[in-house]
Amino acid sequence: MGKVIFYGATSLDGYLATADDNLDWLTHLSGIPADAGTDVLSHMTNAIMGRVTYDYVAQQAPDAPFNPANPQMHNYVLTHQNRPNLPLTTFTQRDVVDLAQALRTQPGDTWIVGGQAILTPLLAANLVDTLYLQLAPLLLGQGKRLFGDLTNPAQFTLLSAHRLGPLAELVYQRRN
């Protein structure tokens, strides 16, 4: 049975992108090790993301695999747009919780990419096994938040905290 894992960065005040979906504040940070995330991301066989995230990455690196640590990873892009599927990308209107539950039954781990519209329902359904949070050394003040409102608290145990150049990486495991 696979795990559902969030792996991503936020500002110190919990934003993962600016209001216009820009990530320059993160991509322009210097000193992040070239191999940051390789160990974790190499185990990802699937990814669930929103269309905005998918389009941003496709625009920034059109000829690169979405996950260089595992170029064969399959992407599930949640969208209401009707787009033709690609060899490693499925565009779907499927409910994120149903999709994550189905992917957990398969071998390999699923990478959750994106913000509160995807992550919060999975946290509410107690489906996120591990959170890898990289905190960037800046306050954006506004933008797209990583976490949305939860009806019930989601509890995690801190597994590790370490430095990735200018980032602090916190690794949490879901409490059962």
Image (spheres, rainbow, N blue to C red):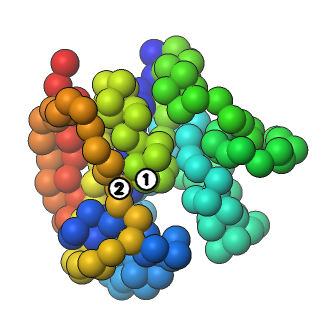
Residue 32 image position (x, y, % from top left): 35, 74
Depicted 89 relative to depicted 146: above or below: above
Image point (27%, 63%), residue name: 14
User: Which image quadrant: the N terminus?
Assistant: top left
Depicted 149 relative to depicted 174: above or below: below
User: Which image quadrant: the C terminus?
Assistant: top left
**Can you identify the residue that label 1 sits on?**
115
Q: Residue 147: in sight, yes or no? A: yes
Image point (32%, 48%), residue name: 148
Q: Quadrant of residue 92?
A: top right
Residue 121 or 136: which is nearer the viewer? 121
Q: Are marks 1 and 2 in contact (CB under 8 Å)?
A: yes
Depicted 175 relative to depicted 40: above or below: above
**Can you identify the residue that label 2 sits on?**
146
User: Is residue 34 left or right of 73 when viewed as pictured?
Assistant: left
Amino acid type for the residue under numbered disc 2: Leu
Q: Quadrant of residue 26?
A: bottom left
Amino acid type for the residue under numbered disc 1: Gly
Image point (15%, 40%), residue name: 159
Residue 45 image position (x, y, % from top left): 57, 35
Q: Residue 86: in sight, yes or no? A: no
Disc 2 crowd, CA 10 A, few/some/many (<14, 14-19, 20+): many
User: Is residue 120 left or right of 171 when viewed as pictured?
Assistant: right
Q: Earlier in the sequence, mark 1 or mark 2?
A: 1
